[in-house]
Image: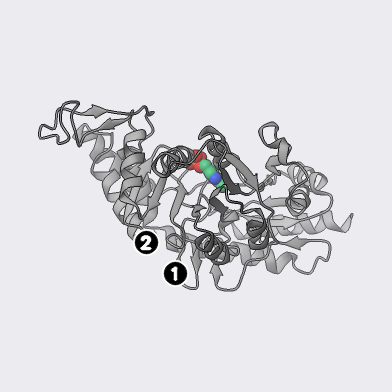
Amino acid sequence: MINLFSSKYDVENCLANIRECLEKGWTGVGEKTKEFEKVWGEYVGFEHNIYLSTATAGFFHTLVCLKELNGWQDQDEIITSPITFVSANHSILHAGLKPVFADVDDTLCLDPESVREKITDKTRAVIFVGMGGNAGELEKVAAICQKAGVYFILDAAHMSGTKLNGRVVGNQADIAIYSFQYTKVLATAESGMVCCRDERLLNSIQRKAWCGIDKSRTPWSEVNKDRWYFDVNEIGDSSLGNDIMASIALAQFSHLEEEIKIRNRIAEKYWEGLKYIEKIGFIRIPDGCCSSRWLFQIVVENRDALIRYLEERQIYAGIHYLDNTLFKPYRYARGTCPKAQYYSERVVSLPLHLKLSEADIQFVIDTVAEFMETQ
Ligand SMILES: *Cc1c(COP(=O)(O)O)cnc(C)c1O
């Protein structure tokens, strides 16, 4: 059986880190969390970093806090992609803002021209997804945002370790949000990180992600001199990360660079094995981008039949993603993004993870080729 995803953990080092936490009797936000925030922030080039229970919580708190800090109104607009995991789009709605869908280009990331067309005087931010680790035209979209004076938020859920012109992708954006969910390139069980330059935003997220608790003041004073007091001026939920997840993240982080090389080699083998087949399309990766290769996607006409054919041979493929405007909360935008619709009906993600053997990779290539001959 060849799964779409399967994470390879450094079991010994994960367990050694977790053991330290358990023996100390502290599994909440502590040293491991702070250490991971520091090493990850240095890696991606941001000064202010907060480790959370999920990336989804990161999107929600980021948008709610930006709205408050900047005085945005309900229904102010956030430009976003229809080809993505629904998480960031749900967060826009949760925050009382309006998702405005721009189309994708052949990188499956937002098309800069479409973004430019969708900007209005109500636009407050653009959320750019680095699909499968691809940087797409990220720098062009960043420049458009800067010119328009709107926030550039990077959904970097697939981008742990993606590089652009030799530099780790992150601080090209105002805010980058990473996911360390169990299938992602840097896998824990569930966790995520918000990285930003604005300390006020970070403090605001910090409070919202722990029930509105403000340790810097008391109900009767602007300054808290006694660590056992705190004030609460706003509501929040409980979505901070913890030292158990950070223990796994730290152990996995030390293998990230080497793992991305392996992922790229697998992607290269798929490409070499399939590029001769005329009826298969591929996703464009711009020059200068070294993708983290969370995904290897192909584009075919008879997509469901291919997935079924693979499944009958115990190869499990996937779809990333269905056009979000097919889903009820986003139906109002259906038909506005023709390219997204095209890819939504045709993309297939082939198995890509570190447990694939040479024989597995060849079997996937041969099986796809065999299917394509019947087309
Ligand atoms: C996985 C994913 C998320 C959500 O990450 P969680 O940590 O699971 O909340 C958001 N956006 C994209 C594009 C993703 O793939």
Residue 124 lies, in percent from the top left, at 52, 49
Residue 24 lies, in percent from the top left, at 19, 35
In this picture, residue 185 sits left or right of residue 14 = right
User: Mark 2 and mark 1: span between their CA atoms?
Assistant: 10 Å
Residue 354 lies, in percent from the top left, at 53, 54
Residue, disc 1: 167
Near-viewer residue (18 or 363): 18
**Quadrant of image for the N terminus:** top right
User: Which colour scheme appears in the figure?
Assistant: one colour
Three-letter residue code for mark 1: Arg
Q: How many tags in the picture? A: 2
Mark 2 burial class by Cα count in 10 Å: few <14, some 14-19, many 20+: some
Evaluate if marks 2 and 1 touch, with contact meaning CB atoms under 8 Å apart: yes
Residue, disc 2: 45
Location of residue 44 by image quarter: bottom left
Near-viewer residue (349 or 50): 50
Q: In the image, what residue occupies the spot 50% across and 35% down?
A: 95
Residue that protrudes farthest toward the front in the picture? 121
Q: Does the beta carbon at disc 2 come under 8 Å from ligand 1?
A: no
Three-letter residue code for mark 2: Gly
Which of marks 1 and 2 precedes in the sequence? 2
Near-viewer residue (226 or 295): 226
Q: Do we see residue 363 in this rendering? A: no
Residue that protrudes farthest toward the left in the picture? 225
Above or below residue 297? Residue 5 is: above
Q: In the image, what residue occupies the spot 37% across and 29% down?
A: 238
Mark 2, secondary structure of its residue? loop
